[in-house]
Image (cartoon, helix red, strand yellow):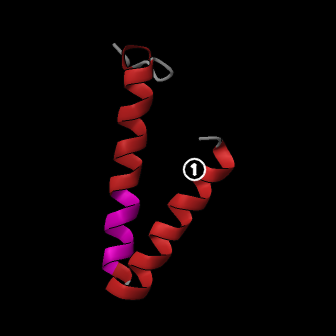
Amino acid sequence: MNAATTGLVAGMALGFAAYFGGFWAFLLVLFLGAVGLAAGLVLRGDFDLHGRRRR
């Protein structure tokens, strides 16, 4: 799946959540999507958690 298709699916999910569930459902879907994106990037190796921490 390319970036345009992924963006389309994410936008549709947020739109459905906002329409059927209201503002709080929209925020919940947005938050969970961000968590899923971060987890996917960490698992793929594109996001290094050790480089982000300060000592």
Q: Is residue 3 above or below residue 17?
A: above
- Number of labels in the image equals 1
Q: Which residue is at the front of the view, 36 or 23? A: 36
Q: Is 5 located above or below residue 48 in the figure?
A: below
- In the picture provided, is 41 more to the left or to the right than 39? right
Identify the residue at horizontal 31%, vertical 78% (top origin). Answer: 24
Q: Position of residue 28 (x, y in %)?
A: 31, 66
Task: Tell me, yes or no, whether the highlighted magenta stretch contains residue 38.
Answer: no
Image quadrant in which you'd find residue 21: bottom left
Query: x and y percent of residue 32 in the render?
Result: 32, 55
Bounds of the magenta segment: 24-31
Provide the secondary structure element on which disc 1 rests: helix
Residue 50 point in image, percent of width and height: 37, 14
Q: Specify the amino acid type for callout 1.
A: Thr
Q: Which residue is mark 1?
A: 6
Mark 1 Cα shell of 10 Å, populated few (<14), some (14-19), many (≥20)? few
Q: Main secondary structure of the magenta part?
A: helix
Q: Nearer the viewer, residue 15 or 35?
A: 15
Specify the quadrant of the image occupied by residue 22.
bottom left
Q: Quadrant of the C terminus?
A: top left
Determine whether 20 is above or below 32 in the image: below
Residue at image location 63% in from the left, 52% down from the top: 5
